[in-house]
Image (cartoon, rainbow, N blue to C red):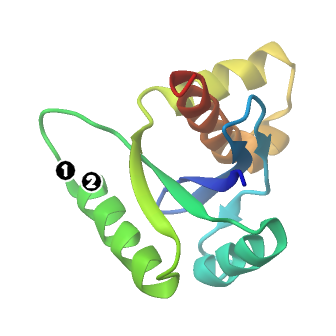
Amino acid sequence: MADRLLCIDFGLRFIGLAVADYPGITARALNTIRTDRQDTLQVIGQVVAAEKITRFLLGFPFSEKEGEIHQRIREFASLLGRQFPTISVELVDESYSSIEADELAKETGMGRRQKRRTQDSQAAKIVLLRYLNAAK
């Protein structure tokens, strides 16, 4: 049976989500969570149930020096592990995914408002597709 992956692009204001089967070749961006308007864990719990998620991939900006965002992502990974103890959490490289998502939005002529609503989930989708491609 294939794993069902949920990739999370963590941010302090917006959290992007994307899903895929593993091993697989396609990924689907979901709605972006606005952390000031939505309960992040509740939304993720709904996605876990609806999509039958078996593994979390959490985007992490690997670099030589770590700052506050790195600590926040590690704390969020720990929180996910406590909230969903049967689902493993794996940190995966998200380097430049937001830049790629921004460039993709520009290429497709997406308006500013729509771009803001979808950019983080598109970044999660990019990270997830990289992960799937690396597994081939």
Q: Looking at the image, can residue 116 be seen?
A: no
Label 1 Cα neighbours within 10 Å, binned few <14 / some 14-19 / many ≥20: few
- The circle on residue 70 is 2
Q: Amino acid at mark 1?
A: Gly
Q: Is residue 111 left or right of residue 105?
A: right
Question: Foreground: 29 or 66?
Answer: 29
Helix, strand or loop for disc 2: helix
Question: Foreground: 34 or 128?
Answer: 128
**Badges 1 and 2: C-beta atoms under 8 Å apart?**
yes
* Residue at (80% x, 65% y) in the render: 51
Quadrant position of residue 14: bottom right
Residue 13 position in % (x across, y down): 54, 62
Residue 81 position in % (x across, y down): 42, 77
Q: Looking at the image, can residue 3 be seen?
A: yes
Q: Most extreme residue toward the front, as rendered?
A: 1
Label 2 Cα neighbours within 10 Å, binned few <14 / some 14-19 / many ≥20: some
Q: Is residue 47 left or right of residue 34?
A: right
Could you tell me how many numbered marks the image carries? Answer: 2
Question: Foreground: 106 or 77?
Answer: 77
Read off the residue under disc 1.
67
Q: Is residue 133 left or right of residue 53?
A: left
- Real-space CA distance between mark 1 and mark 2, rounded to the nearest whole angstrom: 6 Å
Question: Foreground: 30 or 133?
Answer: 133
The quadrant of the image that shows the N terminus is: bottom right
Q: Amino acid at mark 2?
A: His
- The circle on residue 105 is none
Residue 33 position in % (x across, y down): 68, 65
The quadrant of the image that shows the C terminus is: top right
* Residue at (31% x, 71% y) in the render: 75
Residue 83 position in % (x across, y down): 49, 86
* Residue at (76% x, 69% y) in the render: 52
